[in-house]
Amino acid sequence: MNSIPSRSLLSIEGMTKSDIEEILDLTDTFDEIGRRPIPKVPALRGRTVATVFFENSTRTRLSFETAARRLSADTMSFGAGSSSLSKGESIRDTVEVIEAYGADVLVVRHPAAGIAQRIDNWTDALVVNAGDGCHEHPTQALLDAYTLRKHKGSLNGLRIAIVGDIRHSRVARSDVLAFTMLGAEVVLVAPPTLLPPSLEGWPVTISYDLDEVLPTLDVCYLLRMQNERISEGLIPSVREYTADYGLNIKRAATLPKDALICHPGPTNRGIEIEAAVASDPRSVILDQVSNGVSIRMAVLFLLLGSGRNLGATSELEGGQ
Amino acid sequence: MSLVIRGGTIIDSEGEKKADVAIGDDGLITEVSSNLKGEEEIDASGCIVTSGFVDLHSHLREPGQEDAETIETGARGGALGGYTALIAMPNTTPAMDCLAVIEQVRALGEKSVCEIIPTGTMTVGRNGEQMSPMGELVDAGVGIFTDDGNGLQDPRLMRRIMEYSTGLTHRLGRPVVLAQHCEVEALSSGGYMHEGAWSSRLGIPGQPAEAEELMVSRDIALVRLTGAHMHFQHLSTAGSVEMVRLAKQEGLPITAEATTHHFSLTDESCASYDPVFKVHPPLRTDQDVIAVRKGLSDGTIDAIATDHAPHTDHSKEKSFDEAPPGMLGLETAFSVSLEDSGLDLPQILALLSWRPAAIAGVLDRHGNTVSIGAKANLCVIDPDITWTVSGNLMASRSSNTPYEGRRLRGRVRHTIQSGEAVVIDGEIQR
């Protein structure tokens, strides 16, 4: 409990292996709480978690709000769509107002890279990056690592393919850093137009051939394919993308029996993943979702839980 | 004699010598020798006396964005930075695409502490579609035309403007200069920093170097076709510098400038996500910085320009994507050049003063030798003093300097505008 508390969570970059492992270890405790009949503890009673989403996202916001409520924190929610931003208020003013309402943590999502880091400079509240443009989505990488560790015991030595629109994916950037830090080997599978312009310094290998890669994998991590990539001229059509990079039943048959299929959601069934594959026993997509709540409980607790020794924390056991 | 600059060392295009400079009431230099006395004396001991700087690339924001800068405040910053002439970019609101706006800028400039030289746009409203009234503006004395902020995308229209400009030489008395902001928008749009290892890592969409280089290449070909005089603004990539080097060897009528930030900062600065480092063209790689310095030292690049681009704090308090591009430059250009260009002092002074003065066609009054009969547009530099950059202490209405907090060596001490000491010991006098 000494490395993370009282510090914003902005990116996987800058975290150490032991930072990540500490969060994953703590998540086991919160995972257990989530399975109780009354999944609620008073650990963060009186604290306020604000979700500040300048970009629409129902799933991530619900996940954070569920995590906050299970810890008995109060929540408030800011959405850009119906807000003062449309009246011309700046992000900084918005953030200062939310802080003035008493928020202890700002969970921030924004369509531009780096905004969580900027907001962290402007506020005394702690900031959790819930996705900044094409940069990072650290809690997604933590929940992914947690999910893989739960099913595989460890990430060490796992061979993981991340398939799809890596270029625009904050999930991929955070996952590459977290997975490789925990000892996994990562191969990026995508056409060149969907890869970042430069992979200098990235600890990954590249493949343009999903069929060749699939039999060698422990984990096949599919990314969401967005229609606007066609209008941007990055791929000829969804049909061609699906033909070359979609995980269909035939391809899934070449994936080892004990391999896992992951997806950050929301899935485009029939595009990057065939409907029947999403319900394949090797798919842990829904498990990712439920682990997301536990991971976010752990993160919020570490940020706000005042650094008490977790084993002796009576607050956790209170139940309501 | 009314004013004497005492005890300094003169450096101008003819060399270096120790002498005092006396300036008459008419603003002309009356004497250059030792032990001169005047009614008013300015101390220049231990300092360099040189001709005032000429910035080929200043955004003074007036008319239209007076909350970010005015001609008055921009000129004050210029004078503090040793400038006696600022070439004002025409991307004002409204744009400098007609006589009325040009006259307004001139009139405001006449009250300021620098000579303000307006440019005209190449196209009406900088829309890239219709040629501006270049003949009318040339008759009013405008000698540089640019759509700066935008590159002119249409190669057919660019060719026509080049051809048309060559027919205006006799009316201006020298060749009309077309100044291009080289950026092929089809490649750059949606990009906010240099595309490369840093943009990929930071998740900020990038602009490839080729967006600049394609237009440099196109315009070199069109200069060869038309014979127009082309000035390339803010060259930022190794490829651009090399193309200009070859074009000059070929003897084409081409000049070029580089900004201080393109030889002192790299794309790594963007890792802070602070939009103070967002600028067009974007900060590039170490290799590009080295190439720009080489271009400055071997004569490929003719001038150091500032691309002084003030923006209010609140307009920069946005995401990197949304914030406007641009950074301050006038008050730091000399010191940053001394620190980071790798050039010696006489080379730097040439690139800040007489070489840009020649491009702007103002050698009759700026960038002249410090000699009897010359207009007294001068600055006095203390090359040994060190100071700390602070945006809030600048004369500019904005504070978006990328060098905030940096210790710099060398600073302008006095500036003489048409014989009047407008800056003495780093203080504006009016």
Image: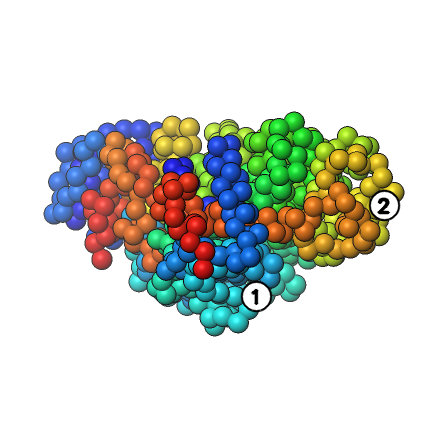
- In the picture of the structure, the residue carrying the numbered disc 1 is B125
Mark 1 and mark 2 in contact (Cβ < 8 Å)?
no
Residue B365 placed where, x, y %? Answer: 36, 48
Give the spatial CA distance, label 2 vs label 1. 57 Å
Question: Tag count in the figure?
Answer: 2
Report which residue position mark 2 lands on.
Answer: A249
Q: Chain of mark 2?
A: A
Residue B170 appears anywhere in the view: no
Q: Is residue B389 left or right of residue A287?
A: left
Vertical position of residue B301 compared to residue B86: above or below = above
Residue type at numbered disc 2: Ile
Secondary structure beneath label 1: helix
Position of the N terminus of chain A, as image quadrant, is top left
Q: Chain of mark 1?
A: B
Q: Nearer the viewer, residue A86 or A95?
A: A95
Name which residue lies at 38% across and 37% down. A2
Residue B348 pos. (x, y %): 39, 34
Residue occupying image coordinates x 40% and y 63%? A98
- 10 Å neighbourhood of mark 1: few (<14), some, or many (≥20)? many
Closer to us: mark 2 or mark 1?
A: 2
Question: Which x, y percent locates residue B428?
Answer: 23, 52
Residue closest to the eye, B427 or B19: B427
For the residues tagged 2 and 1, is the chain the same?
Answer: no
Asked whether the viewer can see residue A190, the reply is: yes
Image-quadrant location for residue B195: top right
Mark 2 secondary-structure assignment: helix
